[in-house]
Amino acid sequence: MTPSLRLQTARPAGRRRSREVMVGKVGVGGENPVRVQSMITCDTMDTAASIQQSLDLANAGSEIVRITAPTIKDARNLELIKRGLLELGCDVPLVADIHFKPDAALEAARWVEKVRVNPGNFADSKKFAVKEYTDDQYAAELERIRERFTPLVLACKARGISIRVGTNHGSLSDRIMNRYGDTPLGMVESALEFARIARDNDFHQFIFSMKASNPKVMIAAYRLLVDRLAKEGPDWNYPVHLGVTEAGDGEDGRIKSAIGIGSLLNDGIGDTVRVSLTEDSIHEIPVARALVGLCAAKPSTGPEDLAPTAEITLSFDPFSYRRRPATHLLSGDVALGLGEVPRVVVRQATLDQIVHKLDRLGDFQPEIVYERANVREVDPRDPAAVERLNHEEGAFLVTVADGVELPVIAAFRLLAARLAERHPILLKDTLNPSTDPQKDFLHTLLVAASNVGSLLCDGIGDAVLIQGEEAPGQSLRLAYNILQAAGSRVFKTDYVACPSCGRTLFNLQSTTAKIRAATGHLKGVKIAIMGCIVNGPGEMADADFGYVGGAPSKVNLYVGKQAVRFNIPEGEAVDRLTDLIREHGRWIDAPAQTAGREQEAVPAGVS
């Protein structure tokens, strides 16, 4: 692990020290708390609706509000939206979201407090073309970008407003893709190019983001970013905005967001967050606020606050995923370890409550009973105890003992660093299970997802025990959904669905529900649902099939990143999508007992 990136070991790290960047009246970074923001979903030209949605978000606790400005006309209307909010006594800072149109960015900069640009499509090409760039050609492209981006930098500098340099996985330019690939490194390099242009103009009021729909990619990109910033020098201490893009809706969207955002907040990375749900954006605020409250570390006061207290080496590479290579081990008739998917463990008391209805739980099945698995419990702070276990012959399923006074992530990282690799590790969502029957399920979900999901993305964990949720069926579902969201185990259809915004060309919420109803039984198939071309096809990344808004009430269908059906009437598009899945041999008929299971309601307390 490099000295410039410190992750939790024996105790939580202090929050990464960053400079303060002002977004209107709101300070981001520095000594400020982690800020919460969201985005309105209506047409930017609908002034009244834009004002009302912005006001609703601000009243719900959104400290910054983002509005799309896809054209110069939309950007000009930001003046009326801003004026209307001020007349109502609301001075929430507004951010203009810009894609493809540098001229719209310049217009927007006249009226808002921050402009967000995506380096992959602001002044660069993205046609998925394969081309070798010579150094001279690459330098010429950078000079062209400098000519397009500098006027915006100077305009923002003159007004005293900020810029977010926000790269998205899957929407990198062809130039970056051909040199670095669609990788976290490519995301970081793309952002740094724009940052250097800003710095060359003595402009420092900018914030970075590295969003992806895959939590593993997102976590790696942010870690690499803050490592690179530290290596560039102490004056590169710019704040970062966190988000898992296209997280989806319901429980799945909340889990995926908690894994990505919670993992980074727990390690002290992140100065502002947005939870992107395919729901009315007002529902994003309580999730974001809860995550920040659970995970965000206080700003550090000195370098010593970032140093781990235990002199150990991490068992994993923080910049790339590799699963810890535990020995293949049998627990009863269930295999554990490298080469096997992480298993779901329950206590005997949990099994006793559900044994009569296992046939009705579908894929949510308990696989290992804790009391029958010869689980070894240790305190990872006791090196002698771990060493005794390491000297025993054979391999054992090992976990951190309940009651150990360490944060969960730190405890299991410490265990993984000290435990012989042959021993598989059983992860727990909490080391101090609550017995409060009134506890909020959203809290339980976010704790479990941020703790267990973070460790799975580190490559740690061969089995999972959810003990923060007493309801047996709900705890099993939570375990499986965390494994799916972390990319550790596939047991159902995977959806990548963007949140609504003013660019969206169809109703994302109702469309997503229709697609889930039609395809929710297709285990292992990944379907992207994108409201417009900005979030597709590139940001569909590794989806098998895509449903993308191409024009008002018209849909384009994709196989991977390739558009194969165009301008399908919205009323026919779901059926045409299922036809496309059939054509490519990925369709199976839904068994009667599982049809519609993806329509399960989100448990009370989640929204």
Image (tube, rainbow, N blue to C red):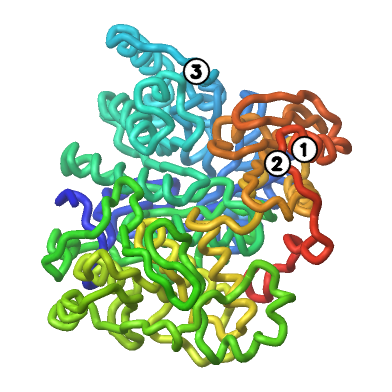
Considering the numbered disc 3 on the image, is that residue within a helix, a strand or a loop?
A: loop
The alpha-carbon separation of the residues under discs 2 and 3 comes to 33 Å
Horizontal and vertical percent for residue 345?
49, 77
Q: Is residue 398 left or right of residue 596?
A: left
Are the two marked residues, 1 and 3, in contact with CB atoms closer than 8 angstroms?
no
| Mark carried by residue 125 | 3
User: Looking at the figure, which quarter contains the C terminus?
Assistant: bottom right
Q: Is residue 359 left or right of residue 343?
A: right
Residue occupying the point 33% across, 55% down: 269
Q: Is residue 68 left or right of residue 208?
A: right
The residue type indicated by label 2 comes to Arg
Identify the residue under disc 1. Answer: 582
Pick whichever, 218 or 295, lies toward us. 218
Image spot of residue 225 (x, y percent): 31, 42
Callout 1 environment at 10 Å: few (<14), some (14 to 19), or many (20+)?
Answer: few
What residue lies at 54% left-to-right and 71% top-to-bottom? 445
Numbered disc total? 3
Tell me the SS state at disc 2. Answer: loop
Question: Is the residue under label 1 in contact with that under label 2 (CB below 8 Å)?
Answer: yes
Work out how far the residue at label 1 is from the one at label 3, CA to CA, in angstroms. Answer: 33 Å
Residues at discs 2 and 3 in contact (Cβ within 8 Å) = no
